[in-house]
Image: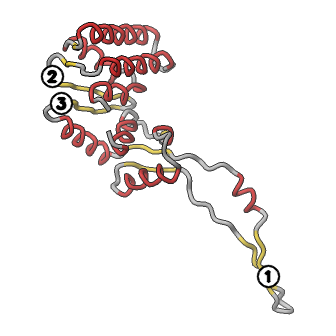
Amino acid sequence: MNNYLKLLLHLKQFEGDGKMHPIEQLFPDLTTSEKGNIFKELVDENFIVLAGREPRYDSYIFEQNILTGESKITESPFNKLNREIPENEYKAKITFKGSKYLKEELEMQEKGKYNINVSGSGANNTFVIESNNVTIDNRPEFSKKIEKIIETIKSDNSIDEELKANAISDFQNAKMEVNKSGKLPEKIMKGILQYGSQIGSIGSLLYQLFTGA
């Protein structure tokens, strides 16, 4: 999955909440400049609305003696403070155009493999996958991703305990089934996909579980 889709998919889970969300943490291996280039390209395409790390400019004081005509320019004492104040990190939200592009791009990439339709309402995602039993080629990697999803659910304080317990149990069952047979039955697969619309924090992780991203 390229960086553009990774960012759009992350923001998709918050679509419609009217808030700007932190995005720099999605790319820990990139410099701030490299991140900014990615974000600004998406802004140019009107796929996201971006805020943060606004440019700062030094200011200077111009003084002129009206009697002698002499003048001087001195640096503003606020420049030092301006340089020391930490920058606000980048935040963004997805646009309708960005959401539409994401859906079309995912469908095109997954054509012939899985047909995954990602749509959102508020902070939630809806995942629809059209396939029968799914064969998992890399069991250790699948298990690793399942564990990451489980840990994310455990630390999500926005969901009630009953939903949290049911989700953890279902993902653990999926992990056991794959480790045993290398396949994920359609019933179990659909069971865990339903959590994409109930637990916003696992949206992108759930998609990556089936795409090998």
Q: Where is residue 206 in the image (x, y as percent from the top left)?
A: 33, 25
Q: Quadrant of residue 191?
A: top left
Q: Position of residue 84 (x, y in %)?
A: 71, 53
CA neighbours of label 3 inside 10 A, class few (<14), some (14 to 19), many (20+): some
Which residue does the image show at 38% across and 55% down from the upper left? 41
Which residue does the image show at 49% across and 20% down from the upper left? 156
Amino acid at the residue labelled 1: Lys
- Contact flag, marks 3 and 2 (Cβ < 8 Å): yes
- Contact flag, marks 1 and 3 (Cβ < 8 Å): no
Q: Earlier in the sequence, mark 3 or mark 2?
A: 3
Q: How far apart are marks 2 and 1 (CA)?
A: 75 Å
Amino acid at the residue labelled 2: Ser
The label number, if any, that marks residue 109 in the structure image: none
Chosen colour scheme: secondary structure
Q: Where is residue 147 in the image (x, y as percent from the top left)?
A: 41, 17
Left or right position of 106 against 164? left
CA neighbours of label 2 inside 10 A, class few (<14), some (14 to 19), many (20+): few
Q: Which of marks 1 and 3 is nearer the N terminus?
A: 1
Mark 2 or 1: in front is 2
The residue carrying mark 2 is 131
Residue with the most extreme bottom position? 68
Mark 1 or 3: in front is 3
Q: Is residue 149 above or below residue 62?
A: above
The residue carrying mark 3 is 115
Q: Where is residue 202 in the image (x, y as percent from the top left)?
A: 39, 25
At mark 2, the secondary structure is loop
Which residue does the image show at 35% across and 13% down from the upper left? 171
Q: How far apart are marks 3 and 2 (CA)?
A: 8 Å
Foreground residue among 212 and 56: 212
The label number, if any, that marks residue 72 in the structure image: 1
Left or right position of 153 against 135? right
